[in-house]
Image (spheres, rainbow, N blue to C red):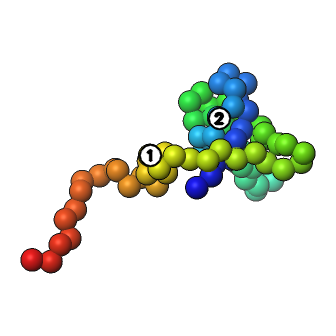
Amino acid sequence: MFAQIFRCPKHGEVWHTEIAEDIDTENDDIYAYRVCSSCYSDVTEVRHEGSPVFHPLTDEEVFWEQEVGWGEESDERCE
């Protein structure tokens, strides 16, 4: 699994971002943009020769990105 790399003005290159939205009630529009998950600053895409740059995730990073570790464990074995 890969994650796109973004440049945060405070943290440098980051891959963990969130999507923020601005709602324009006068024009009935919603504008979505990415922000740093740590400081909520606007981020920009890191590009190389016009293509976005991606970071390969480790197995542990994939595990936590999929939120598999959240909540109580369930045991669904048939006995």
Q: Is residue 55 above or below residue 7?
A: below
Q: Residue tagged by mark 1?
A: 60
Q: Which residue is mark 2?
A: 14
Assess whether mark 1 and mark 2 are in contact (beta carbons under 8 angstroms): no
Q: Earlier in the sequence, mark 2 or mark 1?
A: 2
**In the image as oriented, which residue stretches furthest toward the bottom?**
78
Farthest residue toward the top? 10
Q: Amino acid at mark 2?
A: Val
Which of these two is toward me, 16 or 30? 16
Task: Give the image location of residue 10, x and y in percent.
Answer: 68, 22
Q: Amino acid at mark 1?
A: Glu
Residue at the spot 85% in from the left edge and 43% down from the top edge? 48
Q: Position of residue 72 (x, y in %)?
A: 24, 54
Marks 2/1: CA distance?
A: 17 Å
Work out whether residue 34 or residue 46 is closer to the camera in this orientation and state it.
Answer: 46
Quarter of the picture containing the C terminus is bottom left
Q: Quadrant of the image for the N terminus?
A: bottom right
- The part of the image, by quadrant, that contains residue 76 is bottom left
Label 2 secondary element: strand
